[in-house]
Image (cartoon, rainbow, N blue to C red):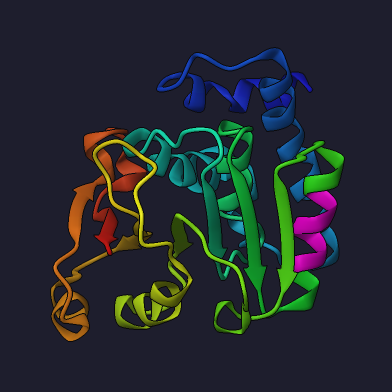
């Protein structure tokens, strides 16, 4: 646990108001992902020692911009190994998350990690976001899954046309990297854009962004 706590330092550099339970949950992620990564390639093998910076803190960039309030419902489209959904669910224990992915073995990992860390606010779905029926969410989140145009086409039908978060309409929030000008142009959207380095001035986050497209 001591090794995991040392790795937690990069998160505690930017966030401090965690309960003891949340700190324990974050500390558990390193050994759990390392164990799963020995069985299947959940995340890049070369990234496992940088889990807290490259995956967990990267996911929490969304929490640096959006302070989700209790009762908000969020779908994580193409969650993969559980990013950004798992770190956000730990950060916001009173927010409900549905983590969806079409790859069964990755959803099995997400289910196991959610159970072992005691996340009561997480559901998982083995399937695509466009297969979700009779459910609506306040926000959709995603991390480098597909072009913005596709993410918007998948998420828009799933969003409630109301506002629960002061200052923000419901919408899509996604983590992207690189030159996004063509991708944004092809989407015909006008998303709000923030550089992650404006929140976390780490070299790792150069040319990485959060895009927010409201309804």
Relative placement, left or right, of 107 versus 62 is right
Q: Is residue 92 above or below residue 108?
A: above
Q: Is 122 or 144 nearer to us in this picture? A: 122
Q: Is 146 or 119 nearer to us in this picture? A: 119
Residues in magenta, as a range: 107-113
Q: How many marks?
A: 0
Relative placement, left or right, of 89 versus 141 is right
Which SS type dominates the magenta stretch? helix
Q: Quadrant of residue 100?
A: bottom right
Picture residue at 79% right of the left edge, 23% below the top: 1
Q: Is residue 14 above or below residue 61?
A: above
Q: For residue 108: magenta? A: yes
Q: Is 10 or 122 nearer to us in this picture? A: 122
Expressed as whole percent of the image width and height from the top left, the position of residue 134 reads: 62, 74
Picture residue at 64% right of the left edge, 58% below the top: 98
Q: For residue 118: magenta? A: no
Picture residue at 22% right of the left edge, 79% below the top: 183
Q: Quadrant of residue 39?
A: bottom right
Picture residue at 64% right of the left edge, 61% below the top: 99
Q: Quadrant of residue 36?
A: bottom right
Whether residue 47 can be seen here: yes
Q: Is residue 123 above or below residue 153?
A: above
Expressed as whole percent of the image width and height from the top left, the position of residue 83 reads: 57, 55
Expressed as whole percent of the image width and height from the top left, the position of residue 51 reads: 59, 44
Relative placement, left or right, of 55 versus 172 is right
Whether residue 37 can be seen here: no
Expressed as whole percent of the image width and height from the top left, the position of residue 9 reads: 53, 21
Query: Can you say which quadrant of the picture contains the C terminus?
Result: bottom left
């Amino acid at each position: 646990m001591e090794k995991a706590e040392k790795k937690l330092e990069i998160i505690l550099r930017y966030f401090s108001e965690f309960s003891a339970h949340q700190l324990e949950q974050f500390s558990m992620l390193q050994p759990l992902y390392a164990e799963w990564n020995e069985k299947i390639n959940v995340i890049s093998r070369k990234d496992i020692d940088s889990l807290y910076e490259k995956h967990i803190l990267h996911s929490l960039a969304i929490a640096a911009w959006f302070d989700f309030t209790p009762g908000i419902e969020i779908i994580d489209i193409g969650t993969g190994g559980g990013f950004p959904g798992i770190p956000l669910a730990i950060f916001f224990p009173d927010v409900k998350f549905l983590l969806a992915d079409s790859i069964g073995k990755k959803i099995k990992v997400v289910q196991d990690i959610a159970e072992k860390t005691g996340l009561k606010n997480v559901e998982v779905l083995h399937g695509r976001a466009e297969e979700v029926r009779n459910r609506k969410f306040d926000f959709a989140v995603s991390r480098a899954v597909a072009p913005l145009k596709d993410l918007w086409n998948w998420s828009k039908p799933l969003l409630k046309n109301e506002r629960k978060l002061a200052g923000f309409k419901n919408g899509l929030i996604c983590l992207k990297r690189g030159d996004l000008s063509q991708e944004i142009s092809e989407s015909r959207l006008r998303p709000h854009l923030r550089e992650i380095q404006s929140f976390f001035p780490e070299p790792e986050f150069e040319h990485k962004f959060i895009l927010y497209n409201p309804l």
